[in-house]
Protein backbone atom coordinates (compact mmCIF):
# COMPACT_ATOMS: atom_id res chain seq x y z
CA UNK A 1 0.00 0.00 0.00
CA UNK A 2 2.99 2.31 0.50
CA UNK A 3 3.27 2.93 -3.24
CA UNK A 4 -0.36 4.08 -3.58
CA UNK A 5 -0.53 7.86 -3.33
CA UNK A 6 -4.22 8.40 -4.15
CA UNK A 7 -7.04 5.95 -3.59
CA UNK A 8 -10.82 6.08 -3.73
CA UNK A 9 -13.32 3.60 -2.36
CA UNK A 10 -16.95 3.53 -3.48
CA UNK A 11 -16.67 7.07 -4.88
CA UNK A 12 -20.18 8.14 -5.90
CA UNK A 13 -21.84 11.40 -6.88
CA UNK A 14 -25.55 11.84 -7.51
CA UNK A 15 -27.33 14.89 -8.89
CA UNK A 16 -31.04 14.85 -8.02
CA UNK A 17 -31.28 11.11 -8.54
CA UNK A 18 -28.90 10.94 -11.53
CA UNK A 19 -25.78 8.92 -10.73
CA UNK A 20 -22.89 10.71 -12.47
CA UNK A 21 -20.13 8.67 -10.79
CA UNK A 22 -20.93 5.24 -9.45
CA UNK A 23 -18.81 3.32 -6.92
CA UNK A 24 -15.47 4.20 -8.54
CA UNK A 25 -12.42 2.51 -7.03
CA UNK A 26 -9.25 4.23 -8.20
CA UNK A 27 -5.69 3.53 -7.09
CA UNK A 28 -2.86 5.72 -8.38
CA UNK A 29 0.68 4.55 -7.84
CA UNK A 30 3.37 6.96 -6.71
CA UNK A 31 5.61 8.23 -9.52
CA UNK A 32 3.34 7.16 -12.38
CA UNK A 33 1.27 8.95 -15.01
CA UNK A 34 -2.30 7.70 -14.69
CA UNK A 35 -5.04 8.67 -17.15
CA UNK A 36 -8.76 8.81 -16.48
CA UNK A 37 -10.44 8.63 -19.87
CA UNK A 38 -13.83 8.01 -21.41
CA UNK A 39 -16.40 9.41 -23.82
CA UNK A 40 -18.31 12.61 -23.19
CA UNK A 41 -20.62 12.19 -20.22
CA UNK A 42 -18.62 9.31 -18.74
CA UNK A 43 -18.15 11.09 -15.43
CA UNK A 44 -14.47 12.03 -15.81
CA UNK A 45 -14.78 15.68 -14.81
CA UNK A 46 -17.19 14.93 -11.97
CA UNK A 47 -14.76 12.34 -10.62
CA UNK A 48 -11.87 14.78 -11.02
CA UNK A 49 -13.76 17.53 -9.21
CA UNK A 50 -14.41 15.21 -6.29
CA UNK A 51 -10.74 14.22 -6.09
CA UNK A 52 -9.74 17.89 -5.89
CA UNK A 53 -12.64 18.73 -3.55
CA UNK A 54 -14.54 21.07 -5.85
CA UNK A 55 -17.43 18.64 -5.42
CA UNK A 56 -18.29 16.65 -2.33
CA UNK A 57 -19.04 12.93 -2.92
CA UNK A 58 -22.52 11.67 -2.18
CA UNK A 59 -20.73 8.72 -0.60
CA UNK A 60 -17.36 7.03 -0.67
CA UNK A 61 -13.89 7.99 0.54
CA UNK A 62 -10.77 9.61 -0.92
CA UNK A 63 -7.34 9.02 0.60
CA UNK A 64 -4.16 10.89 -0.30
CA UNK A 65 -0.88 9.50 1.06
CA UNK A 66 -2.95 7.37 3.43
CA UNK A 67 -4.88 10.34 4.80
CA UNK A 68 -8.64 10.67 4.47
CA UNK A 69 -9.26 13.92 2.55
CA UNK A 70 -12.93 13.30 1.74
CA UNK A 71 -14.21 16.18 3.83
CA UNK A 72 -11.44 18.66 3.07
CA UNK A 73 -11.63 21.86 1.02
CA UNK A 74 -9.64 22.51 -2.20
CA UNK A 75 -7.11 24.79 -0.51
CA UNK A 76 -6.48 22.20 2.18
CA UNK A 77 -5.66 19.40 -0.24
CA UNK A 78 -3.51 21.78 -2.30
CA UNK A 79 -1.43 22.49 0.79
CA UNK A 80 -0.97 18.74 1.22
CA UNK A 81 0.64 18.59 -2.24
CA UNK A 82 -2.35 17.65 -4.43
CA UNK A 83 -2.64 20.44 -7.04
CA UNK A 84 -4.77 20.65 -10.16
CA UNK A 85 -5.02 22.53 -13.42
CA UNK A 86 -8.28 23.31 -15.17
CA UNK A 87 -9.70 22.44 -18.59
CA UNK A 88 -10.19 26.15 -19.30
CA UNK A 89 -6.91 28.03 -19.08
CA UNK A 90 -6.73 29.95 -15.80
CA UNK A 91 -3.99 32.55 -16.23
CA UNK A 92 -4.03 36.30 -15.59
CA UNK A 93 -4.18 37.67 -19.15
CA UNK A 94 -2.86 41.17 -18.41
CA UNK A 95 0.17 39.92 -16.47
CA UNK A 96 3.29 38.69 -18.24
CA UNK A 97 4.18 35.01 -18.25
CA UNK A 98 6.91 35.76 -15.71
CA UNK A 99 4.49 37.64 -13.45
CA UNK A 100 1.98 34.79 -13.59
CA UNK A 101 4.57 32.28 -12.39
CA UNK A 102 5.98 34.72 -9.84
CA UNK A 103 2.53 35.18 -8.36
CA UNK A 104 2.28 31.42 -7.80
CA UNK A 105 5.74 31.39 -6.24
CA UNK A 106 4.67 34.05 -3.75
CA UNK A 107 2.78 31.32 -1.94
CA UNK A 108 6.08 30.68 -0.12
CA UNK A 109 5.52 33.92 1.82
CA UNK A 110 2.39 32.44 3.42
CA UNK A 111 -1.13 33.83 3.23
CA UNK A 112 -0.09 37.23 1.88
CA UNK A 113 0.53 37.89 -1.81
CA UNK A 114 2.23 41.22 -1.04
CA UNK A 115 0.36 43.24 -3.64
CA UNK A 116 1.27 46.45 -1.78
CA UNK A 117 5.00 45.71 -1.63
CA UNK A 118 7.54 47.32 -3.93
CA UNK A 119 8.26 45.35 -7.06
CA UNK A 120 11.87 44.99 -5.95
CA UNK A 121 10.76 42.72 -3.08
CA UNK A 122 9.08 40.39 -5.54
CA UNK A 123 12.05 40.14 -7.89
CA UNK A 124 13.57 37.57 -5.56
CA UNK A 125 11.29 35.08 -7.28
CA UNK A 126 12.37 35.95 -10.82
CA UNK A 127 15.17 33.40 -11.16
CA UNK A 128 12.96 30.51 -10.10
CA UNK A 129 10.13 31.79 -12.28
CA UNK A 130 12.45 31.85 -15.30
CA UNK A 131 13.58 28.30 -14.50
CA UNK A 132 9.97 27.14 -14.54
CA UNK A 133 9.29 28.96 -17.81
CA UNK A 134 12.34 27.19 -19.25
CA UNK A 135 11.00 23.85 -18.03
CA UNK A 136 7.76 24.33 -19.96
CA UNK A 137 9.36 25.76 -23.10
CA UNK A 138 8.42 29.41 -22.56
CA UNK A 139 11.85 30.98 -22.11
CA UNK A 140 11.29 33.45 -24.94
CA UNK A 141 7.89 34.54 -23.64
CA UNK A 142 8.76 35.74 -20.12
CA UNK A 143 7.79 39.36 -20.85
CA UNK A 144 4.81 38.53 -23.05
CA UNK A 145 1.34 39.20 -21.65
CA UNK A 146 -0.36 35.88 -20.98
CA UNK A 147 -3.39 36.99 -22.98
CA UNK A 148 -1.23 37.29 -26.10
CA UNK A 149 0.06 33.70 -25.92
CA UNK A 150 -1.34 30.98 -28.16
CA UNK A 151 -3.77 28.56 -26.54
CA UNK A 152 -1.14 25.83 -26.30
CA UNK A 153 1.37 28.16 -24.67
CA UNK A 154 -1.26 29.37 -22.19
CA UNK A 155 -1.71 25.75 -21.12
CA UNK A 156 2.06 25.41 -20.77
CA UNK A 157 2.07 28.56 -18.62
CA UNK A 158 -0.68 27.14 -16.45
CA UNK A 159 1.42 24.02 -15.92
CA UNK A 160 4.35 26.25 -14.93
CA UNK A 161 2.21 28.00 -12.30
CA UNK A 162 1.07 24.58 -11.05
CA UNK A 163 4.70 23.46 -10.78
CA UNK A 164 5.46 26.62 -8.81
CA UNK A 165 3.33 25.22 -6.00
CA UNK A 166 5.78 22.28 -5.78
CA UNK A 167 3.06 19.61 -5.93
CA UNK A 168 3.76 16.04 -5.02
CA UNK A 169 0.87 15.07 -7.27
CA UNK A 170 -0.47 17.01 -10.26
CA UNK A 171 -3.96 16.59 -11.63
CA UNK A 172 -4.32 17.83 -15.20
CA UNK A 173 -7.84 18.36 -16.55
CA UNK A 174 -7.82 17.63 -20.31
CA UNK A 175 -4.49 19.40 -20.88
CA UNK A 176 -4.74 19.06 -24.69
CA UNK A 177 -8.43 19.93 -25.13
CA UNK A 178 -9.10 22.21 -28.10
CA UNK A 179 -5.49 22.26 -29.30
CA UNK A 180 -4.04 22.06 -32.77
CA UNK A 181 -1.93 18.98 -33.51
CA UNK A 182 1.41 20.74 -33.00
CA UNK A 183 0.31 22.09 -29.61
CA UNK A 184 -0.89 18.62 -28.56
CA UNK A 185 2.54 17.18 -29.34
CA UNK A 186 4.19 20.00 -27.39
CA UNK A 187 2.08 19.42 -24.27
CA UNK A 188 2.59 15.64 -24.41
CA UNK A 189 6.35 16.16 -24.52
CA UNK A 190 6.07 18.69 -21.69
CA UNK A 191 4.24 16.22 -19.47
CA UNK A 192 6.97 13.67 -20.15
CA UNK A 193 9.62 16.18 -19.08
CA UNK A 194 7.98 17.24 -15.83
CA UNK A 195 7.04 13.79 -14.59
CA UNK A 196 10.36 13.17 -12.78
CA UNK A 197 9.75 13.01 -9.04
CA UNK A 198 6.00 13.55 -9.42
CA UNK A 199 2.79 11.62 -9.79
CA UNK A 200 0.40 12.81 -12.49
CA UNK A 201 -3.28 12.01 -12.88
CA UNK A 202 -4.81 13.41 -16.05
CA UNK A 203 -8.35 13.47 -17.35
CA UNK A 204 -8.29 12.95 -21.10
CA UNK A 205 -10.82 12.31 -23.85
CA UNK A 206 -8.43 11.21 -26.57
CA UNK A 207 -6.91 7.74 -26.16
CA UNK A 208 -4.19 8.50 -28.70
CA UNK A 209 -2.87 11.28 -26.44
CA UNK A 210 -2.16 8.86 -23.59
CA UNK A 211 -0.52 6.26 -25.84
CA UNK A 212 3.13 6.05 -24.85
CA UNK A 213 2.57 8.64 -22.12
CA UNK A 214 0.62 6.93 -19.36
CA UNK A 215 1.56 3.93 -17.25
CA UNK A 216 -2.03 3.13 -16.34
CA UNK A 217 -5.33 4.05 -17.99
CA UNK A 218 -8.70 3.86 -16.27
CA UNK A 219 -11.68 3.97 -18.63
CA UNK A 220 -14.98 5.33 -17.38
CA UNK A 221 -18.35 4.95 -19.04
CA UNK A 222 -21.71 5.98 -17.60
CA UNK A 223 -19.97 6.86 -14.37
CA UNK A 224 -18.44 3.44 -13.73
CA UNK A 225 -15.04 1.87 -14.35
CA UNK A 226 -15.18 -0.11 -17.58
CA UNK A 227 -11.56 -1.20 -17.87
CA UNK A 228 -8.10 -0.51 -16.52
CA UNK A 229 -4.55 -1.32 -17.58
CA UNK A 230 -1.75 -0.13 -19.83
CA UNK A 231 -2.43 1.21 -23.32
CA UNK A 232 -2.05 -2.15 -25.05
CA UNK A 233 -4.51 -3.80 -22.68
CA UNK A 234 -7.12 -1.04 -22.77
CA UNK A 235 -6.99 -0.36 -26.50
CA UNK A 236 -7.54 -4.06 -27.27
CA UNK A 237 -10.47 -4.45 -24.88
CA UNK A 238 -13.67 -5.13 -26.92
CA UNK A 239 -15.81 -3.36 -24.33
CA UNK A 240 -13.67 -0.23 -24.60
CA UNK A 241 -13.78 -0.33 -28.39
CA UNK A 242 -17.56 -0.65 -28.34
CA UNK A 243 -18.35 1.83 -25.57
CA UNK A 244 -15.61 4.39 -25.94
CA UNK A 245 -13.82 4.32 -29.27
CA UNK A 246 -16.85 3.56 -31.40
CA UNK A 247 -16.94 3.33 -35.17
CA UNK A 248 -14.26 6.02 -35.57
CA UNK A 249 -11.58 3.58 -34.42
CA UNK A 250 -13.08 0.23 -35.43
Image: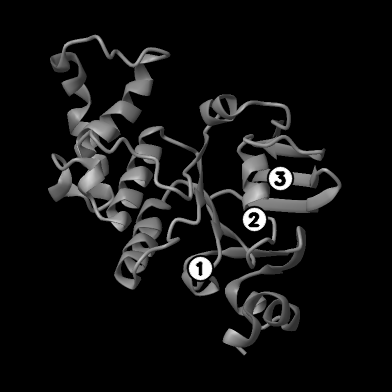
Please tell me whether residue 180 is drawn above or below residue 20 in the rendered image: below
* Residue at the spot of label 1: 210
Count how many numbered circles sit on residues in the image.
3
* Mark before the other along the chain sequence, 3 or 2: 3
Q: Nearer the viewer, mark 3 or mark 2?
A: 2
Residue displayed at 73% across by 39% down: 62
Image spot of residue 137 (x, y percent): 23, 53
Please tell me whether residue 216 is drawn above or below residue 14 in the rendered image: below
Q: Residues within 10 Å of mark 3 (few under 14, many from 20)?
A: many
Please tell me whether residue 61 is drawn above or below residue 193 in the rendered image: above
Image spot of residue 211 (x, y percent): 50, 73
Residue displayed at 75% across by 79% down: 239
Give SS at disc 2.
helix
* Residue at the spot of label 2: 44
Q: Residues within 10 Å of mark 1 (few under 14, many from 20)?
A: many
Q: Find the distance from the CA under tag 2 to the CA under tag 1.
A: 15 Å
40 left or right, relative to 88: right
Image spot of residue 59 (x, y percent): 83, 39
Give the quarter of the image for residue 165: top left
* Mark before the other along the chain sequence, 2 or 1: 2
Q: Which mark is residue 7?
A: 3
Q: Which mark is residue 139?
A: none
225 left or right, relative to 81: right
Q: Find the distance from the CA under tag 1 to the CA under tag 3.
A: 21 Å
Amino acid sequence: MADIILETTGLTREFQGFVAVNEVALRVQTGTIHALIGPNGAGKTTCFNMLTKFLQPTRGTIRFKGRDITGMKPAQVARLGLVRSFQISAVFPHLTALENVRLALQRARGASFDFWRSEAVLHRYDDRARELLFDVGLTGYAETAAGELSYGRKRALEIATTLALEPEMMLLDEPTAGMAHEDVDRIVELIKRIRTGRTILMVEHNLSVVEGLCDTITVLTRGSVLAEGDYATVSANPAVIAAYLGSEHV
